[in-house]
Image (spheres, helix red, strand yellow):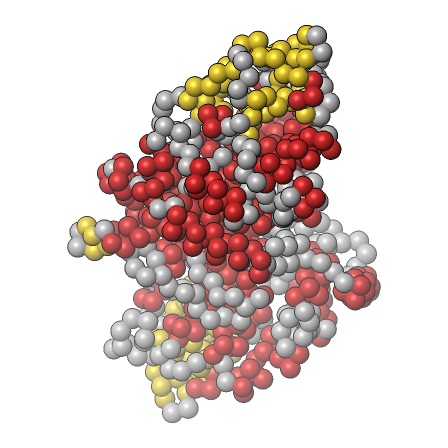
Amino acid sequence: MDLSLTEAQEMIKNTAHSFLEQECSQERVRELDESETGFEPGLWRRMVEMGWVDMMIPEEYGGSGSSFTDLGVLYEEMGRVLLPSPHHSTAVLGVLTILEAGTAEQKGRLLPAIARGELIIAVALTEPNYGWEPESVQMRASRRDGHFVLDGIKLFIPDAHIADKILCVARTSDSDDPAEGITLFLVDKGSPGLSCRTLSGWMGTKLNEVKFESVEVAAENVLGSVDKGWAALAPVLEKAAVVLCAYMVGGGQGALDHSLEYTRTRVQFGSPIGTLQRVQDHMIDCVNGVDAARWTTYEALWKIDVGQPVSVAAAVAKTASSEGFHKACDSAHRAHGAIALVKEYGLYMYTKSARTLYYYLGDPTHHRRRLAQLLGM
Amino acid sequence: MDFELHYTGEQEAFREEVKEWLKVNLPEDMEPLVDPTNPTPDQYKWAREFRSKLGEKGWRAPTWPQEYGGGGLSMDKASVIDEELAKHPIPQIYDLGVSLCAPAIMVWGTEEQKQRWLQPIMRAEIAVFQLFSEPDAGSDLAAIKTRAVRDGDEYVLNGQKIWNGSKYPVDLLYTLVVTDPDAPRHNNMSAFMIDADTPGITKVPLNMIAHHKNEFYFDNVRVPAANRIGPENEGWRVAQSTLEVEHGGGGTLVSRNHMVHKLIEYCKNTIRDGQPLSKNEGIQQTLVDLYIKAEVGRLWGARNYWMRHTRQSSAYEGPQSSLHGKLFGVELAKTILDILGPYAMVNDPTWAPLIGEFEHHQRYSLAFPGGGTPEVQKVVMARRLGTGKPPQRAAATY
């Protein structure tokens, strides 16, 4: 047993920390949040140069083949400053799905392009009937003249507005088992009939409506076997959720750091407010939320790395991280009072992110239900 | 990172040695116990002999130096011993010698004191109670009043302690008393090891719903100055070395959450209204929620175990884990009550589920003040986190 980071991981952490301190100030993140796309190509380019985008890509396809724990260490740092980027969609969900389902030709074509930062992918799974179970996938793709035609709406899709390709999950046949009959399509964003609209609202990530109106997709752009897409996607969703958890750990830590600092500097009743036990209670809830997320996440990352079954640990980690990040931010608001509502103060960015990631890749109810199944209840 | 202990061939060979030793020294037909910490007089007698044998091997404090009665073994071999012992329902003797008293002696004691007490503690020749709290000094431990007045080579003690020990005999009392009533709080007390049979000590049992505890009265009790641990008036700091461990800083790898797993199994195997309790969606969500909290508790315990055994300095982690365990126990009791109704409250041999373990949990989960109330854990956590002030580090322990 050794719960310390390796030397290489310490290096990833420190490098990321100083880079993000410099390049990703709170003001810059807020500016990006308020911009139309929330995306800055220059920052993405720097991330590519630093080797962050190819971490999940094996060396044979131009990547560094890092471990999940390595990636988790980076994600915690990214979450601490709420770095906005299509990294998770492209370099985690996209890459892992291509690795799991893609042909040798597809891998050889797509993965090096991702590694070079030339291809951004958005994964479109959820629909107006929102959910992360296979039964929620209802959008149809029908065969016509050797290709497929996609019709329907994908909703709440991060990064679709800046993506080059949409990885679309659609139903190609009906079966008693909802996990059967699902196929994965890699669709060019410029395909005729495909339109994308960014939703307005209070969200930590830009979310989109992606509309497919008789969009033709060539058979060669199917990822994996027709009708067998869910079997390839399910383990990817599980692992990608754990990586996302590490970002949420970082986010919670960011909210905690802000709040602790505030309890030392804000004076009421003649003393720093952190000397008041009512305020201390909120800070204790805050750190407990973050640490519940942290240790369930790192154990799940470790299980992926050593090849142990990870389903239970992943469901535990996503529940603990959704709840923990949310709790951390609510506690931060309780400790701060009205100043937390002022945009320039910046705390709300964490709160918004906690609420957005709370349900992304499955909310706690989804994962609790899954856990009940896994525990044989 | 690596969340698992790995055993080498040498350590697995050692496991065989431990198993073989246990086969020889444990009876074949050990009955499951509702509460291993509350033995019957017969079990107590047996357990005293058993733990002496364990002590002779140095296996009660496996990672401690052999010269002080420890086993001189690695952390991995120590956990092999823990794992093998945990497989048997072995009655426990209430004795805080190894767990809480020895670390303070190790940090603060003179070489002579280490030689005098550590061996007998580790070898289980003696049992130690901790006498810290007083009727008017509970969470506010620094408010103790029991007084020690220096008289030549001795101190003379007068006062009263509470919430101590068990119903079985004790040999040594690890005690905190005021040695300078004019000095400021935290700088006015000293720590002593007192022979329990010193004239003037009276032990009076309390009548409680959980645990057997006593009051101790001191009436002109004469204690040699050589029994003082640490410098005079430094007792508060000596006590911190103990409290650090008591507040969860020791960590654990042996799961404390077995009750959750028993409850889940019980709900899977108990039919109500034609289906297992665990098929009821409300019960299912509650059980899963408890499972997740138990996982968090397990991981925090493992983290603290790793931090202590790799001798890393900690901050809020000890009280965080302790707080979680205490509040989780209470929540679990409520859930058991919700799911089982009156079955949660009986230890009747005909009707009690799990030979009465759920009933036991209803009472014992309320014993959360032991080792500091949840509120005290929060106070310590807040100091270590640095709310309102720069953060404090944890006290030195062993």
Q: Is residue A70 left or right of residue B229?
A: right
At 62% from the left and 51% from the top, the residue drawn is B255
Front residue of A78/A177: it is A78
At 49% from the left and 44% from the top, the residue drawn is A47
Q: Please, is residue A17 above or below residue B105 in the view?
A: above
Q: Please, is residue A159 above or below residue B19 in the view?
A: above
At 56% from the left and 33% from the top, the residue drawn is A119
Image quarter (top left, top right, bottom left or bottom right) of the N terminus of chain B:
bottom right
Q: Is residue A322 visible?
A: yes
Query: Residue B319: x percent and y percent?
Result: 45, 56
At 65% from the left and 28% from the top, the residue drawn is A233
Residue A79, quarter of the rendered image: top left
Query: Residue A92: x percent and y percent?
Result: 58, 37
Q: Is residue A181 left or right of residue B288?
A: right
Query: Residue B313: x percent and y percent?
Result: 48, 66
Q: Please, is residue B243 above or below residue A363 in the view?
A: below
